[in-house]
Image: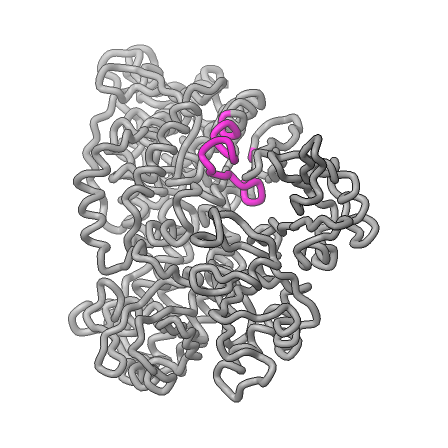
């Protein structure tokens, strides 16, 4: 405001012109504000009701004129991934001054019809205190040696077209109306797919398949060309990729399938035996995390071993690990959590009790932990030590608060060293995702209240997103959805799913009828498609062995380790042998043993055998992990199986397959163990539950006198009757000298 216009008696400010500013915004630009303009110090802040790009004509201009007073307007909005408007924007950089008219002429030459100038820079130095300036200020004053701001376009397709045309202009021939010093870049966090000329976010679920076909390499030698990169890849016998040299010293390679990318990581990654050389200079492979930051805070994969040594020796001992936190327990994995949730569901169905579970997916961990750091941590390629400590402490405090919630699940069994004991389970954690457990709807509401206190702008900054979170419950009554706070502290309802849909964010499909069928079918179709794609590529033995053993088999057998999808193992073996015959051009009658011979053959992993051994390994590992929640519910489930089936000892002590109708976790596991060709001897320390002990002295178990088929029949009969047949004395007279007659047995057992 011009000081000469100030009255002598009083000092006026922008607050005195609030009504006039609101009227001009509505009359000239159609811009209205929710609740009007609000006072904020000596500023007016408003939340506009219009959210379209065309509604921002006033902020684009950057100022209003009220009589002889100039009012600066600041465009505070910046697009985010949630609503997709970040795909409408480009970063503008130019060391030279450009007038608004020249800028719009350059943008129209690149294919834009309109654009909004969005200020995001902070001025400093001789231009005054550091603060956000209006959009018009970005065109008049340099910031950090460059004019920098964002350009917002009416649509994503227009932004992509402008960026594609700018890349062609930079490669030549140049456009006359575009200044040679002008640069356009995608927003940080976004990536450019050169083959399709579109933007994508590497952490978005919809881009997972595309990201698997890409790898970044750098830093490149000066003046590196596409031919230089292709020449360096010819010795690897890989298919020709699309090469996109981004101009920041890096290049993005895009293949048709994920297999070549996996091979590059195995051969030239942090654990590879060879390095990729371009013009006699070694370059490194990098994860696709959007436009890289140009700061020394980058955590490179070369420091992986050093960082994780420090974490293992100095950081982990200091983090207070709650035993329900599966992400930071060194000897406990997500498999433990999956087993635990499976047994919780089966326990509720067996007891006919209510059970409520909320799966809360953490969309944004913490404001001080960038997405690229989380990506490095997840892929075990490095990470910030402070980030790991922050996650560990935050999640530990959260789980301790959740463990004090109402109506938890009480687990009781007799396998404690000091006799029968009871533990409670209220919540589980998988690194940064949470699973709340309760036996009542009020209890699960209590868990959501605790989570909401720990999230949002006024708390840690962590956000449990409602989009991927959901409520799963077993109850005869219908219940409404639970609401979780978003990043602004506003409650958002989550989805309610059926038990058969299960915990999809873990990559599994829990439920009771033919578990995992849905996900295994998807993996099977994907493997067949990739097998057809690599067949004509002419891969060698080592490359094919890596793709099958390290890429395909883990993606499929992860779903068979604890489920009834074990039947997919033989089919996978057949698929991999057929693929190997096609790739290596072997005769049809080539012996199967050659494919699994590690010395003289191909050295493939035998899927069927590996599935059996992995399932037993997971079971035995959890059974020996005394003190973990998964161990306790596993022991309670084994006791329940023993009592319901009428067994006289630990279920593993009998090679009796359960009935075919038993599709529970223990049912499929014990049926699998009973069919092992080589009998297994498993030593157990087992405290017999009181109900399974004999009531007569010197009584003998009846199971030693039955064939496996009769044993299965007896288990079925015991499960359908309250009175069990466990001992020989159950079917003999009181002295044990003769068997009871059929009418006597019918009278005794009903």
Q: Is residue 116 left or right of residue 701?
A: right
Q: Position of residue 622 (x, y in %)?
A: 29, 36
Tell me if residue 34 comes above or below residue 175 in the rendering. Answer: above
Q: Is residue 349 left or right of residue 37?
A: left
Q: Answer whether residue 465 is magenta in the image.
A: yes
**On the image, which quarter does residue 86 sit in?**
bottom right
Between residues 470 and 39, which one lies in front from this camera angle? 39
Between residues 438 and 58, which one lies in front from this camera angle? 58
Q: Which residues are magenta?
A: 450-472
Q: Is residue 572 left or right of residue 614?
A: right
Image label count: 0
Q: Position of residue 552 (x, y in %)?
A: 37, 63
**On the image, which quarter does residue 703 sit in?**
top left
Residue at the (63%, 32%) spot, across then down: 481
Instruction: Using the rendered image of the protein, determine whether residue 70 is visible from the camera's viewpoint.
Output: yes
Tell me if residue 261 comes above or below residue 654 in the rendering. Answer: below
Residue at the (20%, 40%) spot, across then down: 681
Instruction: Using the rendered image of the protein, determine whether residue 655 is visible from the camera's viewpoint.
Output: no
Q: Is the image coloured rainbow, by chain, by secondary structure, or in one colour? A: one colour
Residue at the (61%, 71%) spot, across then down: 103
Q: Is residue 748 left or right of residue 468?
A: left
Residue at the (53%, 64%) spot, across then down: 91
Q: Position of residue 59 (x, y in %)?
A: 68, 54
Q: Answer whether residue 77 is magenta in the image.
A: no
**On the image, which quarter does residue 286 sit in?**
bottom left
Between residues 116 and 288, which one lies in front from this camera angle? 116
Tell me if residue 671 comes above or below residue 395 in the rendering. Answer: below
Q: Position of residue 327 (x, y in %)?
A: 34, 40
């Amino acid at each position: 405001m011009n000081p000469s216009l100030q009255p002598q008696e009083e000092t006026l400010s922008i607050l005195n012109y609030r009504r006039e500013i609101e009227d001009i915004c509505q009359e000239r630009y159609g811009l209205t504000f929710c609740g009007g303009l609000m006072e904020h110090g000596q500023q007016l802040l408003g939340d506009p009701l219009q959210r379209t790009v065309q509604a921002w004509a006033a902020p684009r201009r950057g100022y209003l004129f009220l009589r002889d007073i100039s009012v600066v307007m600041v465009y505070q909005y910046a697009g985010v991934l949630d609503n997709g408007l970040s795909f409408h924007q480009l970063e503008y950089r130019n060391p030279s001054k450009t007038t608004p008219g020249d800028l719009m002429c350059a943008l129209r030459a690149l294919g834009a019809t309109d654009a909004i100038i969005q200020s995001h820079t902070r001025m400093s130095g001789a231009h005054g205190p550091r603060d956000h300036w209006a959009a018009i200020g970005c065109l008049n004053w340099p910031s950090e040696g460059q004019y920098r701001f964002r350009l917002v376009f009416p649509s994503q397709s227009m932004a992509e077209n402008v960026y594609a045309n700018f890349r062609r202009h930079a490669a030549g021939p140049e456009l006359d109306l575009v200044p040679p010093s002008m640069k356009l870049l995608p927003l940080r966090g976004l990536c450019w797919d050169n083959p399709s000329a579109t933007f994508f976010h590497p952490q978005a679920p919809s881009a997972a398949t595309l990201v698997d076909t890409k790898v970044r390499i750098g830093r490149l030698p000066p003046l590196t060309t596409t031919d230089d990169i292709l020449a360096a890849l010819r010795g690897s016998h890989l298919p020709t990729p699309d090469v996109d040299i981004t101009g920041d010293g890096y290049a993005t390679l895009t293949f048709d399938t994920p297999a070549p990318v996996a091979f590059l990581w195995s051969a030239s990654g942090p654990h590879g035996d060879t390095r990729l050389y371009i013009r006699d200079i070694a370059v490194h492979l990098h994860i696709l995390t959007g436009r890289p930051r140009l700061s020394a805070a980058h955590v490179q994969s070369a420091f992986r071993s050093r960082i994780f040594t420090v974490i293992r020796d100095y950081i982990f001992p200091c983090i207070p690990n709650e035993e329900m936190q599966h992400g930071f327990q060194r000897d406990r994995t997500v498999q433990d959590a999956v087993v635990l949730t499976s047994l919780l569901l089966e326990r509720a169905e067996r007891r006919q009790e209510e059970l409520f579970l909320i799966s809360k997916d953490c969309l944004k961990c913490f404001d001080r932990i960038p997405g690229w750091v989380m990506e490095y941590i997840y892929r075990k390629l490095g990470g910030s030590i402070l980030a790991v400590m922050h996650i560990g402490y935050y999640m530990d405090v959260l789980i301790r608060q959740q463990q004090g919630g109402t109506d938890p699940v009480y687990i009781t069994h007799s396998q404690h060293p000091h006799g029968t004991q009871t533990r409670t389970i209220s919540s589980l954690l998988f690194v940064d995702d949470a699973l709340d457990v309760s036996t009542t709807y009020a209890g699960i509401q209590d868990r959501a209240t605790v989570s909401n206190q720990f999230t949002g702008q006024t708390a840690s900054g962590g956000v449990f997103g409602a989009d991927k979170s959901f409520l799963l419950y077993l109850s005869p009554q219908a219940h409404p959805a639970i609401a979780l706070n978003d990043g602004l502290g506003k409650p958002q309802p989550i989805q309610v799913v059926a038990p058969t849909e299960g915990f999809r964010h873990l990559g599994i499909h829990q439920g009771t009828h033919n578990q995992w069928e849905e996900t295994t079918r998807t993996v099977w179709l994907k493997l067949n498609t990739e097998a057809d794609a690599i067949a004509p590529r002419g891969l060698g033995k080592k490359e094919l062995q890596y793709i099958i053993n390290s890429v395909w088999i883990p993606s499929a057998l992860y779903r068979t380790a604890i489920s009834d999808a074990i039947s997919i193992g033989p089919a996978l073996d057949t698929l991999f042998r057929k693929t190997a015959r096609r790739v290596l051009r072997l005769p049809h009658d080539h012996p199967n043993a050659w494919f699994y011979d590690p010395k003289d053959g191909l050295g493939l992993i035998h899927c069927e055998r590996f599935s059996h051994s992995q399932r037993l390994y997971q079971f035995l590992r959890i059974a020996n992990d005394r003190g973990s929640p998964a161990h306790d519910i596993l022991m309670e489930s084994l006791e329940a199986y023993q009592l319901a089936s009428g067994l006289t000892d630990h279920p593993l002590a009998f090679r009796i397959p359960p009935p075919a109708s038993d599709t529970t976790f223990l049912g499929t596991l014990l049926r699998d163990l009973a069919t092992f060709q080589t009998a297994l001897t498993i030593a157990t320390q087992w405290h017999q539950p009181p109900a399974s002990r004999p009531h007569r002295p010197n009584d003998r178990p009846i199971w030693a006198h039955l064939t496996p088929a009769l044993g299965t029949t007896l288990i079925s009969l015991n499960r359908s009757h309250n009175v069990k047949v466990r001992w020989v004395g159950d079917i003999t007279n009181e002295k044990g000298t003769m068997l009871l007659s059929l009418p006597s047995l019918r009278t005794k057992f009903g």
